[in-house]
Image (cartoon, helix red, strand yellow):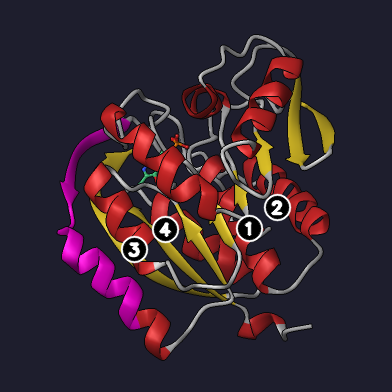
Amino acid sequence: MTRPQQARVLVIAGSDSGGGAGIQADIKTIAMLGGYAATAITAVTVQDTNGVHDVHAVPVSIIAAQIETVLADIGADAIKIGMLGSQAVIEAVAGALTDVAVPIVLDPVMIAKGGAHLLRPDAVEALTSLLVPMADVVTPNIVEAEALSGKKIRSPEDARDAGEAILGLGAKAVLVKGAHLKGDQISDWLVTPGRAKEWVDSRIATKHTHGTGCTLASALAVGLAQKMPFEQAAWRARDYVRQAILAAPGFGAGHGPLGHGW
Ligand code: PLP
């Protein structure tokens, strides 16, 4: 087993000035779980707990250069992909990762909780055709699972079916996050070839859930970088998110950040 501190995760994602989601959540999570985080920043968002106010896209060549430079010198034991923004960025990231042999966790970030588009709707097709097939695991929420699978999701069973459809696009595993469905229980599905496992939890009553998706995907990536068995890494990632929601500091007027460290 790789010593935990040696587990390198290269995060390809956007910056959240509010510190709740994006790169900031990724670095906190990876460090808390004992890994090493390097970053290729795709966009700088102007953001607080009320939402995304503006987005500055990083030039595509600089995104590719960040990935290539980090991989050539530091290396990585896992890759986490978050906000990409556009088709051109998806193409560049897919190109820069072509020869990478470590696990890839793809969080198919599309729309922020406040409604801002973090991926242009016309880029979904590039995501499904270029990056989903490269992913060891894709972690869509309900809205993202609908967009990737083309299926409407109204129940946990629909979410499982969408996960199976995304598996059919070439991903090795899909973790469909069910929190966007209404109800006191949240059901997440871990779908792998020939198997669908449901994890049900009671919903935590809180508005401070900003950054849960980024945190989950990073926690999963660091577990894989640490060579944890896949299901154990997914379980620990869900547990980390739950603890982080319970530890939320309550900052800001809107959807506040999670707590890291408790
Ligand atoms: N900002 C950035 C840079 C993100 O990557 C994400 C999500 O992945 C968000 C905002 C949205 O976070 P949330 O939907 O948890 O509010």
Q: Nearer the viewer, residue 189 or 196?
A: 196
Tag 4 secondary structure: helix
Q: Which residue is mark 3?
A: 95
Kindly check if marks 1 and 2 are in contact, taking CB atoms under 8 A apart as contact. Answer: yes
Q: Which residue is mark 1?
A: 219
Q: Which residue is mark 2?
A: 237
Residue 61 in the magenta stretch? The answer is yes
In 3D space, how far apart are the residues under numbered discs 4 and 2 (Cα atoms)? 17 Å
Query: What x and y, as percent, mark residue 30?
Result: 57, 66
Q: Nearer the viewer, residue 204 or 139?
A: 139
Residue ID at (42%, 58%): 24
Residue 91 in the magenta stretch? The answer is no
- Front tag of 4 and 1: 1
Dot 4 or dot 2: first in sequence order is 4
Tag 3 secondary structure: helix
Query: What x and y, as percent, mark residue 167?
Result: 65, 38
Name the side, left or right, on which 42 lies relative to 138. Answer: left
- Front tag of 3 and 4: 3
Crowding at label 2, few (<14), some or many (≥20) Cα neighbours within 10 Å? many
Kindly check if marks 3 and 1 are in contact, taking CB atoms under 8 A apart as contact. Answer: no
Crowding at label 1, few (<14), some or many (≥20) Cα neighbours within 10 Å? many
Work out which residue is located at the far bottom of the displayed protein and give it.
73
In 3D space, how far apart are the residues under numbered discs 2 and 3 (Cα atoms)? 28 Å
In 3D space, how far apart are the residues under numbered discs 1 and 2 (Cα atoms)? 5 Å
Residue ID at (61%, 14%): 153
What range is drawn magenta here? 51-69
Q: Is residue 42 visible?
A: yes
Q: Does the beta carbon at disc 2 come under 8 Å from ligand 1?
A: no
